[in-house]
Image: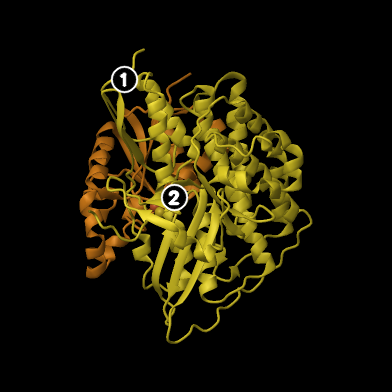
Chain colours: A yellow, B orange
Amino acid sequence: MSHQQDLDITIDQISKIEGHAEIDVKIRSGEVQEVKLKVNENKRFYEQAVRGRPFHTVPQLVSRICGTCSVAHLNCSLEAVEKAVDITISDQSRLFRQLTMDGLMIRDHAMHLYLFSLPDVLGKDSVLDLEGPEKELLHQAFHVKSAGNALSKMILGRAIHGIYSQVGGYSVAPTTEQIQPVIKELRDVRPYVLDLLQIYLDCPFDFRRTTHNVALVSDQYDYLDGMIHSSRGLCVHEEHYGEHLTRVVIPYSQSAGYEFEGMDYMVGALPRMNLNRAALHPHTIRDAKKFISVFPSNNIFHNNLAQGIEILHGIDHALDILEGADFKKEAAVQPAPLPKNTDSTGVAVIEAPRGNLYYMVSIKPDGSIQYANIVTPSAQNQINMEDDLKLLVTEHLDKSKEKITFEMEKLIRAYDPCFSCASHFLKVNWT
Amino acid sequence: MGKKLRVGIFSFTGDEGCVITFVEILNYKIRDWADKVDFVHARVLRNKNDMADIDVSFVEGAIASDKDRRKLLEIRENSKKVVAIGTCAISGAPSNHRNFFDEATREEIRPILQQFQHLEKVQPLNAFVRVDAVVPGCPIIEPTFVKVMENYLKEFGVT
Ligand code: SF4
């Protein structure tokens, strides 16, 4: 087929992603003139909504920014608030938070890998259309998801908008009888994850564009602590992360984009694996060696493989904590009295499933929120995704409209974007 | 194979927590529902979606923009039953924070509301269409969702 001369493509709602977004492409005289990724998730103004609220109510409120990664918003806002009011949580609470992150990664990555991306790999429209021997994958999908769900539920009371978590600790601790079935479920699904990894290793999808990677790096592949590293060798403490970001207003999108050090960059499982794979759990490193050896990689489709490895890490890490665990109910740590004349500020950066999540809160002397700033992973990836799309369309100019459309959707799905989260930013100056 | 219930899953302004909870319900219901339910419109699960002649539409989220409103009317027109799932769809909350902002905050967000044709107020589904059933919760209460689905399976004669 000859080169596309004049062509308009509109994908009015990208399917099998979190939230709502569309793509507009304009090709004129064989040249890509315009590629727009438009987040059309209606803003819900959480940063404004938290102002004036008592600080201890904030985590439950911001949990509602995102259904699928509510646990990440919960944990990140808790950490920011606790820093502001000078609370250090107990070692057990820290373990609970890590377990909730493991559960989140297992559940959320499994949803993406099995339900959203696998149909692309197997040439189906939906995972529900799988037939014959492949149908087994459908059941494995729901089984793996369910194991992650059970883990989060055990600690938080439910997997979405968990209720046991509070500023300073947890209102409930799981009993040994509750832990045992979760251990069993995690063990049962572990082999499925290795099969899934093989599928993504064999998958021939390839798209590369050199870009900046940014991720939290720690010695235990911890999603909650560590320093923020970039692939260009920068190392930033979480408190200063905001100073390296530039918010970019994209007039056609309901989400702002971000640049790191003035450049487009990527956050998520792929950057984490590129920058921190040596810190994975020893059992994960032992059993997933051939998959891990693919990294470092700049193939965006390896984000899928990286997510799969993180499911395995989540299982291994959680099993380590749970086997032989004996948790006790503890009282929540109480905040120090707030200073009388100044606001107290706390900053937290954690790794949510789709990349780092930034919270900055400042609390007035009366305990109410003065200001909150939230930067979500998919907002950070927005410019990078759009730049990838531009290159992808340029590389596919000799293909049919249907093929270009499919390739664009497939690429966006590899990022596993979450646009429910993305549309949060403070001020807009339309120019 | 007999008739299957034609089901749509839709999402408006919210955090998709209810749709994700629906996907979690499939963890234990998929074996049972696979032969009884046809998810003909579910962007979370498929790309090729069919809006015609839906038996039951489960709708999450509040109505915040004119685009939301028009889409909701289209869903109503094409569905025999419409079920509001989650408090956003039932009452607007918690996606309706902006309805209660003071004047200064309203001024602050006005440019965004105008740029993207938001409605003056965030509204529940029943401000615009008839709602046949609800599944409360934030997110939805799982057993209630299952019960509503199974009642409709019966009502539509799917066994
Ligand atoms: S009701 Fe709650 S869980 Fe459901 S979409 Fe609204 S905010 Fe999300």
Q: Amino acid at mark 2?
A: Gln
Mark 2 on the same chain as mark 1: yes
Q: Nearer the viewer, residue A225 or B62?
A: A225
- Whether the residue carrying mark 1 lies under 8 Å from ligand 1 is answered with no
| Relative image position of residue A193 (x, y in whole percent) | 66, 36
Secondary element type, mark 2: helix
A282 left or right of A10? Answer: right
Q: Nearer the viewer, residue B29 or A272?
A: A272
| Relative image position of residue B18 (x, y in whole percent) | 44, 47
What chain letter is assigned to the residue under label 1?
Answer: A
A171 left or right of B69? Answer: right
Secondary element type, mark 1: loop
Q: Amino acid at mark 1?
A: Gln
Label annotation for residue A380: 2
Residue at 63% across / 32% down in the picture? Answer: A196
Q: Is residue B94 above or below residue B83?
A: below
Contact? badges 2 and 1 (CB < 8 Å):
no
Residue pointed to by mark 1: A4
Residue B52 seen by the camera: no
